[in-house]
Amino acid sequence: MVAGLSVVGSLAWNLGVLLRPGPIDHQVLDNVPNPLGVPAELGPVFEILTPIGALLAILAIALAAGSLLLRYRRGDGVVRAQIRWFAVIAAVLVVSLALTMV
């Protein structure tokens, strides 16, 4: 269920960005029209796909984290140690990504 939710979320987000009508939103490609953009009449449909996809992806991440927490609570010593290693690596990743944004 969580994997399907993440696939649907990322697909919706990517389609919303890829098929958005109008100019490409990029610093270098200023005022270049999107060659894959849909007609302007369908623009609102694809404008709403991006936030829906992001919301579904965030929901999938939260459900995956909850599943991992539940597995940690129900697991034996070996499973708990493995999940602790995973948590350490995930924390390093989050901190390094936060530092790149500063």
Image (cartoon, grey):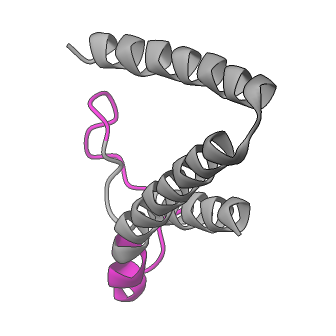
Percent of width and height locating residue 85: 64, 16
Percent of width and height locating residue 82: 73, 22
Looking at the image, residue 42 sits to the left or right of residue 57; the answer is left
Q: The C terminus is located in which quarter?
A: top left
Residue 40 visible here: no
Q: Quadrant of residue 52?
A: bottom left
Residue 40 vertical placement versus 4 (above, below): below
Instruction: Report the number of discs.
Output: 0
The residue stretch that appears in magenta: 26-47
Q: Quadrant of residue 83?
A: top right
For the point 63% across and 23% down, the residue is 86
Nearest to the observer: residue 73 or residue 19:
73
Percent of width and height locating residue 56: 48, 66
Looking at the image, residue 18 sits to the left or right of residue 32; the answer is right
Secondary structure of the magenta portion, mostly?
Answer: loop
For the point 36% across and 89% down, the residue is 41
Q: The N terminus is located in which quarter?
A: bottom right
Q: Residue furthest left?
A: 102
For the point 34% across and 35% down, the residue is 29
Q: Is residue 10 magenta?
A: no
Residue 8 vertical placement versus 73 (above, below): below
Q: Residue furthest bottom?
A: 41
Residue 101 vertical placement versus 52 (above, below): above
Q: Quadrant of residue 94?
A: top left
Nearest to the observer: residue 5 or residue 16:
5
Residue 28 visible here: yes
Percent of width and height locating residue 14: 54, 57
